Amino acid sequence: MQLIKGHKNSSHSSKAKNISSALAAATCALLGTPAMAETVDEGWQIDTALLYYGESDRVTALEGVVAGKKDFGDEHIFSGKLVIDSLTGASASGAAAQPGVQTFTRPSGNGQYTIAAGEIPLDDTFKDTRVQLDAQWTQPLWEDMRGSTGIHISNEYDYLSVAFNGSFARDFNQKNTTLSAGLSYAFDTIDPEGGRPVPFSEMVVDVGQFASEEAYENAFDATRQEGSDDKTTIDLLFGVTQVINRRMLMQFNYGYSMSDGYHTDPFKVLSVVDSQGLTQTLLHENRPDERSRHNFYWQTKYAMDNGVADVSYRFSTDDWEIDSHTIDSRLRFNLTDGSYIQPHFRYYQQSAAEFYQPFLLDGDPAPQFASADYRLGEMTAYTLGLKYAMTLNNGNELGFRLEYYQQGSKNSGFSEPGVLQDLDLYPSVKAIIAQVSYSF
Amino acid sequence: MCARFAAMASPCELLIDNCDQTIAYQLASLAYRETKRIEQKFSRYLSGNLMSQINNSNSRPVGIDEETYRLLVFATTCFELSEGLFDISSGVLRRVWKFDGSDLVPTAAQVAALLPFIGWQKVVYNKDSITLPTGFELDFGGIGKEYAVDAVAKLCTKHQPGLSVLVNFGGDIQVTQPRVNSSSWQIGIEDPNSHKDALKVLTMKTGGLATSGDARRFLLKDGIRYSHILNPTTGYPIIHAARSITVTANHCIQAGLLATLALLQGENAETFLAAQNVKYWCVR
């Protein structure tokens, strides 16, 4: 006994030894359970995805996402995400289709492109790479209360967005009810190549009227504003999540968003047409520099015996008079213990902004604001998709998603003079979305 | 779903994730029967059971079953890993050390008189029998409750392999598997200084957790606090023992042993724990 004691004193005071694995082996022998690897510390949970988005004849995007999440213990959770996407292709410029060939100057001022008769004008200079970084920290603050704060940075060639957010969530009623409140502040800077157009300035198109390159450049520069511009956005969010019963969860959110600054799209134009519907000139658009929006969101998740139903509805209304309705539903069916399919249906509908105009009429008084961007017009869109995912032998999940997106724009009551009656003024978009995801 | 019963001088509960009452009832009655079985067999406070046969055998061999043999092998491993500090034959010391919060510290002679009846290395056993020297006593108190938690958890997994069940016997806990929605079980660690408030809320997806140390069991004499953790080699309480240590590991009994062995390290508890690569909380 004395020997043991003496030995103990000398060894333990100097260096503690690891007995964990010997004890683990003894435990497994005692309990008759197979020995297992020590999984004391949970590592990072990593989700990766590669997404392809392809519109017919328009924009093609390729996006890679790496998201990581780690619980540092007691729900002190860090999550981060890196997204890189590249966009190429063409998008509708806002100009009206015409019975003849049309020539446009590229937004940068460098070069021209032509659009065939009867075609909706597409600006094909769309090419950009975007890098987005998100980081979020969430932790319990005190009893039943959690706090979360994060930063978001998104950068593309001519656009930089930096946002901060903070939120609190508190559980009530034995964690059956959660109230949350959040705030986010975003600061965006835009500095398009070729500068921001002067509102309602005419697009300068070189059809041989300029004596020199310099004369063209001077005329182009006269339609541009110096420097960059910015926009700030404040979002407020209030939410209630309620456990209805063991299978059902419901969530209501109200969001209020205010933005102030440069909202105009520097690449969008409007055609000014005469009484025959023929384009006389092209004007750069102009949007209000303030926008405020109310969002109402309801979501229900229902756990079935072999799957999950997830249905949501969003109503959004803003002071540009765009009202929108979104219905989104996902139904997950478990095929086996380790695999499922998930059909997805989404329907979206919006009314036009009060200053939306598919074109301007020559001779009409100049409006204060106007845009022919189809995204501000009346439209409906739906998405149909299917996801299949399976858990691999090593416990990691591999998923495939394929979706079809179709969006159609409508005339919200504009009478079309002359030739415009025979032309397609409202672009529709059809796209395929394909995604492969892997989580480990 | 929650089921509660009292056994092993502890409140025992089963928290069952997302199941109907029939299954909860089935698991609760299984758990209750298993716990009572282990208590009946290994409690040293009962008469006529296996433990009392062994403790009153006066150097005669007593027949044992396979489960008892496995527990003895486990106790031997713990004795060796702790270099003699964890000794299930040291229970006799409780005859003179009564940790009731009083100042009744035994005399050196009283303690010395018991030391010859302690020493796991003097106990002989094999698969079929155990021979305990006269005057010796075995006490499974240091592992019995944790063993019962693991045994109940194992039964739950056998009968309801898909369910996440949290087995909690007075703070010694085993979670059978992650919950369906992969959320965690939340566990409050009691603050020995306040009794009422949870000191810390921690989360568990699966695995075991156990706490050793009891702030309410001590002696206080001449300003010296004697912890209830006794050093079997000296017969005296461990000096500078932590008040309470909580450890998580794959199994409850593993966590319990690590916590107890850490307490036995006295002031080196944290160093010892840090070397084990486990999550722990040490209250001084």
Image: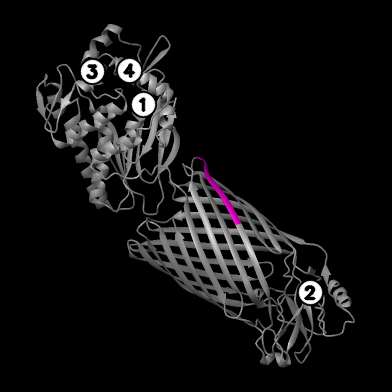
Amino acid type at image mark 3: Ile
Question: Does residue A438 appear left or right of residue B123 in this picture?
Answer: right
Find the magenta span and give its range.
Answer: A133-142
Circle 2 sits on which residue? A109
The crowding category of the residue bearing disc 2, from other C-alpha atoms within 10 Å (few below 14, some 14 to 19, many at least 20), is some
Q: Are marks 2 and 1 in contact (CB under 8 Å)?
A: no
Q: CA distance from mark 4 to mark 2?
A: 88 Å
Chain under numbered label 2:
A
Percent x, y for residue A29?
A: 24, 39
Query: At 22% from the left edge and 48% from the top edge, which residue is drawn?
Result: B26
| First of labels 4, 2 by sequence position | 4
Circle 1 sits on which residue? B213
- Asked if badge 4 and badge 2 are on a common chain, one would say yes
Q: Are marks 4 and 1 in contact (CB under 8 Å)?
A: no
Chain under numbered label 1:
B
Q: Secondary structure at mark 4?
A: helix
Chain under numbered label 3:
B
Question: Does residue B178 appear left or right of residue A148 in this picture?
Answer: left
Q: CA distance from mark 3 to mark 2?
A: 95 Å
Percent x, y for residue A93?
A: 70, 78
Query: Which numbered tag is attached to residue A5?
Result: 4
Chain under numbered label 4:
A
| First of labels 1, 3 by sequence position | 3
Q: CA distance from mark 2 to mark 1?
A: 78 Å
Q: Identify the main secondary structure in magenta.
A: strand
Query: Which numbered tag is attached to residue B85?
Result: none
Percent x, y for residue A139?
A: 52, 44
Circle 3 sits on which residue? B118
